[in-house]
Amino acid sequence: MKKLLANLDKEKLRRNLRLAGLIVAAYVLVVLMVLVATDARHVRFYLVDGPEISTAYGKPFTDPGRYAVSTGRITGEGEKELPVETTGEVDTSVLGTYELQYTTRYHLRSYTVTRVVHVEDLTPPEITLEYREDYEPSWFTGYDEEGYTASDDYDGDVTARVESVLLEDRVEYTVSDAAGNVTTVERPLHYTVTRPEITLEGGEEVEIPADLTFTDPGYSATDSLGNDLTKYVKVEGEVIPYKIGSYERSYSISNELGETVSVMRTVNVTPAKLPEIVQPEGRVIYLTFDDGPGPYTARLLDILAKYDVKATFFVTCLNPDYAYLVGRAYSEGHSIGVHSATHNYYTIYASEQAFIDDFNEAEAMIYEQTGSYTRLFRFPGGSSNTVSSFNPGIMTRLVKLMTEAGYVFFDWNVTSGDAGETTKTSVVLDNVVGGCSGLWTSVVLQHDIKDFSVAAVERIISWGLRNGYTFLPLDMTSPNAHHGTNN
Ligand code: ZN
């Protein structure tokens, strides 16, 4: 019985277990069927560049790519690419936001994703530089804009928005469109290679003998393109040509950019060298005539020509109508020296510069008439005059200055008396003959603006020639009959 009972229980247990197994199997089967059914419906879209993109205005739109795959992992189908249909339009000729739908079908079902496409102005404007044929920017005048245009695919002509910046070696142009796209282009320039060079004739240090006028030894400026910029050179630094010393002079040229090229020169003014005095042989008379030319000068020249006697004229500018006679005298072999333009003591002895200004005026007249400058002169009143004492020491200073400047002055040792003592020709003759008689070398003072004095000249010459005198014109080496200064 026990055994029967035991067999019965075993039988029951076995049946129950089989039932449980069936239930579990059925459950598993259902779960699997559900899994397979749902797993098979997985579709995945891949959108290259993502679900929201921007594309350029005005350019053809190209879909960056999309595809769909089924994802049956459990069923072992793996990834299988599915055909995708696209709907929707992107119009790149109109700014805006567009949508594209991508659709695929799988197991009788339809799947769709959407991509947002923004049509935007993504293209920067274009700058076109214009070039002038054969144009080379000059360092001196700066860059003269050759021109440019700028256009934008959306904004159109944006030339007016271009900003240009002139730099040392280039121009930079920048423009932006309304969407904020920026373009920069460069135009290279050649200023740096065209900086001019200033060349100093005679070098950076020159030595010049003192003179009454200063002439720069010369300079030039050219750029590397061969442009002559000499006329733009600014010269600064005064040289006082009669004052011994060292002077600094600068030569510079500046351009419109404010750049400057400059060089310096030291000018050393040194005392001029005067030739040695040469004592002429025999008895010599130097006839000298001051204060002309005037109404009687032509007559005097005729007399001198008649005897082939050469004399010396210390001239003024007081009778311009007769100035041409300075030219005649010079061409006939007479010496010409400066006396004074104005012959006004209070003007010419007021200062060194006043004297020089007056002197240069007379010198200019002489040059105009003769084509030649002279280095001979006679101080109005002579070097020993005291009429200049209103300016103490002026004669001493002028004698030094003029001598250092290379000019030779003459006084006299025979006076004719025609400056005031007499108005008689016979007295003039007596004074000159008497004065010369005791001298080997005579420097005779007469005035050719005095009729009665000129009238004595023919007899003076006759007397001199008869008595073995030679008449000579003064030159740089002649005895000078200096009086010595009294002021
Ligand atoms: Zn005089």
Image (spheres, rainbow, N blue to C red):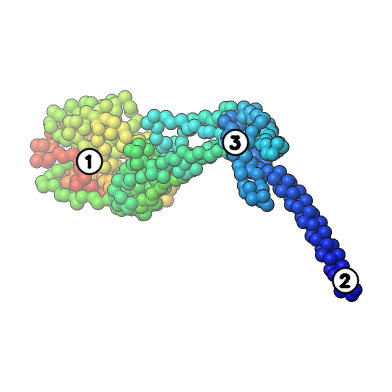
Q: Residues within 10 Å of mark 2 (few under 14, many from 20)?
A: few
In this rendering, the label closer to the viewer, 2 or 1 = 2
Please tell me which residue is depicted at 70% across the width and 36% down the height of the picture: 108
Identified at 25% across, 28% down, the residue is 325
Badge nearest the viewer, 3 or 1 = 3
First in sequence: mark 2 vs mark 3: 2
Name the secondary structure under disc 1. strand
SS category of the residue bearing label 2 = helix
Q: Quadrant where the N terminus lies?
A: bottom right
Residue 4 - label: 2
- Amino acid type at circle 1 is Val
Front: mark 2 or 3 = 2
Viewer-closest of 83 and 439: 83
- Estimate the x, y position of residue 395 in percent, counting from the top left: 36, 49
Above or below, 364 against 246 in this view is above
Residue 352 visible in this rendered orientation of the protein: no
Dot 3 falls on a residue whose secondary structure is loop
In the rendered structure, find residue 444 and report the number of the disc placed on it: 1
Q: Is residue 68 left or right of residue 425?
A: right
Q: What whole-number distance in Å separates the C-alpha atoms at marks 2 and 1?
A: 190 Å
Tell me the amino acid under the disc marked 3: Asp
Q: 198 and 322: which one is in front? A: 198
> Compared with residue 287, is residue 17 higher up or lower down, i.e. above or below?
below
Q: Residue at 82%, 59% (x, y): give it.
A: 19
- Residue 27 in the figure: left or right of residue 452: right
Tell me the residue that label 3 is attached to.
63
| Percent coordinates x, y for residue 83 in the rendering | 62, 37
Residue 237 x/y as whole percent: 42, 47
| Residue 267 on image: x %, y % | 34, 51
Residue shown at the point (36%, 41%) measured from the top left? 223
Q: Residue 482, labelled with which disc?
A: none
